[in-house]
Amino acid sequence: MDFIPTFDLHTFITAPWSDGLSGSIWILVMGFLVNAACGLVGNFLILRRMALVGDAISHSLLPGIAVVFLISNSRSTGLMVTGALAAGLASVWLIEFIHKKTRVKQDAALGVTFTTFFAIGVILISVFADQVDLDLECVLYGEIGWIGFEDSWLVMGTEVPIPLLQMGVTFLVVLALVIVFYKELLVTSFDSGLATSLGIPASWIHYGLMMMLSLVIVFSFESVGAILVIAMLIMPGATGALLSDRLPHILTLSVIFGGFYSLAGIHLAEWLNCSIAGAMVVSGFGLFCLIWIASPRRGLLVLSLKRLKQRSSEVSVN
Amino acid sequence: MSPEIPLPLEIHDLTVAYHKKPVLYGIDLEVPAGQLVGIVGPNGAGKSTLIKTIMGMIPPSSGWVKIFGKPYRKNAKRVGYVPQRESVDWDFPVNVMDVVLMGRFGHLGLLRRPGKKDKEIAMACLEKVNMAPYAQRQISNLSGGQQQRVFLARALAQESDLYFLDEPFAGVDAATESAIISILMELRERGKTLMVVHHDLTTAKEYFDMLLLLNMRKIDFGPTEDVYTYDKLQTTYGGRLTILSEVADTRQKQSDELPLEK
């Protein structure tokens, strides 16, 4: 069988770390930072029943990036982030606007908006193909292994790749914002009516969260692409909710899962010789299934054991 | 009342529209302090819309609201709120204590989290509604009555002077209903003002000091004994009241007949 390479446990475990060790370490850290930052923001999307807004924003960023490219003809990070943030917020605003001004429901408004934004991005890139040096494949799928690890800064005696520094700062900013605004995020997600009555500006928190989401997505873009980033946003929180029903625990679990996805993804990609980002998502789903089956509180195993016990006790009573 | 002490709630010419369709027309209201007020009217009369507009959740098309003489935002801390139970997701990953602590958020500034004192207040409020043993319970494992008690405890933790309650008796057991009403009456004794959206006309008469009859417009507002008349209720409910009064009549007959049978 050529389709699936032979599985050799020894190479599976050791290969990523035997040659090009530092490369693998940077990919591992980068993957962790992307997954953890996405997971933290994504939890609040899940709680607000906005899981697919991440989808919408990630696709809407494309025209923003393309326009910035056309105007400035540069890849400067500051401009890219500005363009992406503007496009992300514009799409969020347009979704709300369509929803409020017409009878179109929110999910349909979302479907109309993000596909249009994405299409505009595709048109821009194909019309100005000679001027826009953007690889659509990279935009869609990303490739964490190809990130420009050559450019680096010296941080405390170690050469750290610049994309990694950017993602590290993004993760720390997200972590700080979630900690500082935890109570506002909590109450606006649980009961926006109460939040407004308390004088907490629910719409500011909403747009703040959307900005944070756009920021995280734009920096995760190169690593995991516009489509797989949605998995990084939603999977950690969805998996965490299988294990715990306290939000602080679920948030912590999401960050830990981020590390696991990264590590498992690297090994799976080494074995199958495939995209690392794709391998991370698939390992994430593997973990999801494992916890779904084996979770000590509501796992399938525990539930069926309980049902068996119940049935046997019913039989003994009879 | 002396002019220096502002009314808890003053509304002038309040009109609210959804998609350009008015749902509330020109509401004028002056609610004195220390009253337990029932807001009564048929479905779609705009009862919830009224209290949501007062609290700034829905922007009015015209008119203004004053809370203790100031715009809502300035006095948000003095207002407590019990939303409809179905308005939140009870599978949300928080426990009872977390929910009650949300009532303290209005008193905490930005960057501050609930401290020991807030937790003590929240616990005391849970004790008041007999829910203290459930403090660490995940909220999805609560009955309807328990959920309503948790919401009431959260409102108590807000330590406000004016309360809005949206159908606090909907779908709760009799024990919870009597527990809630006795807490509301106790709050009134302490000079608080309470506005309660209420569905059941028969209990409205015994529970409330004052009634606001609402059906898109203010039909009437005043002491219960003046407002609770057949004509005014008929105006509020339109033709539908006949069904209600028939129910009331048969219930009356049944209770009249019972002693005779003995």
Image (cartoon, grey):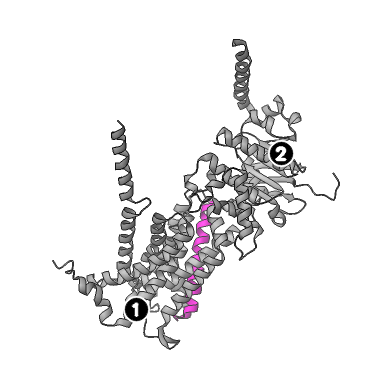
Residue type for callout 2: Leu
Residue A222 on image: x %, y %: 38, 74
**Residue that protrudes farthest toward the left in the picture:** A1
Secondary structure of the magenta portion, mostly? Answer: helix
Magenta span: A72-101
Task: State the SS at label 2.
Answer: strand
Residue B81 on the magenta segment: no
Residue A130 horizontal side relative to residue A45, left or right: left
Residue at left offset 51%, top offset 64%: A210
**Residue that protrudes farthest toward the top in the picture:** B261
Residue type for callout 1: Ile
**Residue that protrudes farthest toward the right in the picture:** B2
Can residue A129 be seen in the rendering of this structure? yes
Q: Chain of mark 1?
A: A
**Mark pair 1, 2: CA separation:** 66 Å
Residue at left offset 31%, top offset 35%: A314
Residue A171 on image: x %, y %: 46, 72
Q: Which mark is residue B36?
A: 2
Residue B227 horizontal side relative to residue A36, left or right: right
Residue A83 on the magenta segment: yes
Instruction: State whether discs 1 and 2 lie on one chain.
Output: no
Image quadrant where one finds the N terminus of chain B: top right
Residue A214 on image: x %, y %: 48, 67
Name the residue that disc number 1 marks.
A25
Please name whichever residue, B191 or A225, is drawn nearer the observer in this view of the structure.
B191
Asked which quadrant contains residue A128, the reply is bottom left
Residue B258 on image: x %, y %: 60, 14
Please name whichever residue, A240 or B9, is drawn nearer the observer in this view of the structure.
A240
Residue at left offset 33%, top offset 69%: A277
Please name whichever residue, B33 or A220, is drawn nearer the observer in this view of the structure.
B33
Q: Chain of mark 2?
A: B
